[in-house]
Image (tube, rainbow, N blue to C red):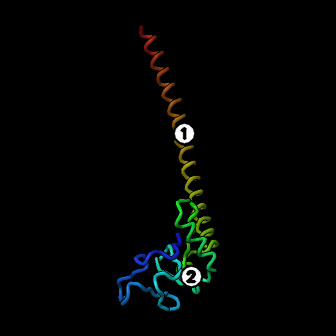
Amino acid sequence: MGRATPSASGKEKDEGKKDKNQWECPYCSKTYPNETKSLKCDTCGNWVCLQCTKIHEQVHDVMHELNNSDSDNAIKWICKLDQRSMPTLKEMSSTLTTIMQSNNERFDAIEAQVKRVEGSIGEKVTEEVASLKDQLMTDISEE
């Protein structure tokens, strides 16, 4: 869920930070106090200032409220860089169509094999029944 403005410890990064009470937005490179309203990307974990997210402060406050409640209404937020690396709906649809076609071909091949096996089972059962019938007739005639 796109977390909004956590405690100071939530924004701390030990890597090269001089002041644990501040954080740097990866988009504008500005340094902000930990209390500054911001959003954390649910994919990469970077904190981004509201100006760079282009999210209105009131929307941030609603997200913050929903994400800090015990409800199932948490809102996921993904930064621009991670959004660009995600496949588009068209790409996902194309991939799913290809997978579906491949699975349909496999299903058709399996279905054909099942029909062949069913057919051969029917023939074998008929042959076995005939053989048992012959054996029974032979046994009866010998008695």
Which of the pair 85/110 is nearer the observer?
Answer: 85
Q: Residue at x 54, y 84 (%)?
A: 49
Which residue lies under the disc numbered 1?
Answer: 118
Q: Is residue 66 above or below residue 111?
A: below
Q: Is residue 29 above or below residue 56?
A: below
> Distance between the Cα atoms at labels 1 and 2?
56 Å
Q: Which mark is residue 26?
A: none
Q: Amino acid at mark 1?
A: Glu
Q: Residue at x 53, y 78 (%)?
A: 39
Which of the pair 90/142 is nearer the observer?
Answer: 90
**Label 1 Cα crowd, 10 Å radius (few <14 / some 14-19 / many 20+):** few
Q: Name the secondary structure under disc 2.
A: helix
Q: Which quadrant holds residue 13?
A: bottom left
Where residue 133 appears, as percent x and y from the top left, is: 49, 20
Q: Residue extending furthest top?
A: 143
Which of the pair 71/96 is nearer the observer?
Answer: 71
Where residue 17 appears, as percent x and y from the top left, is: 37, 88
Q: Name the secondary structure under disc 1.
A: helix
- Reading the chain from its start, which is encountered first: label 1 or label 2? 2
**Label 2 Cα crowd, 10 Å radius (few <14 / some 14-19 / many 20+):** few
Which residue lies under the disc numbered 2?
Answer: 80
Where residue 94 appears, as percent x and y from the top left, is: 62, 69
Which of the pair 124/137 is nearer the observer?
Answer: 124
Where residue 8 appears, as percent x and y from the top left, is: 42, 78
Quadrant where the C terminus lies? top left
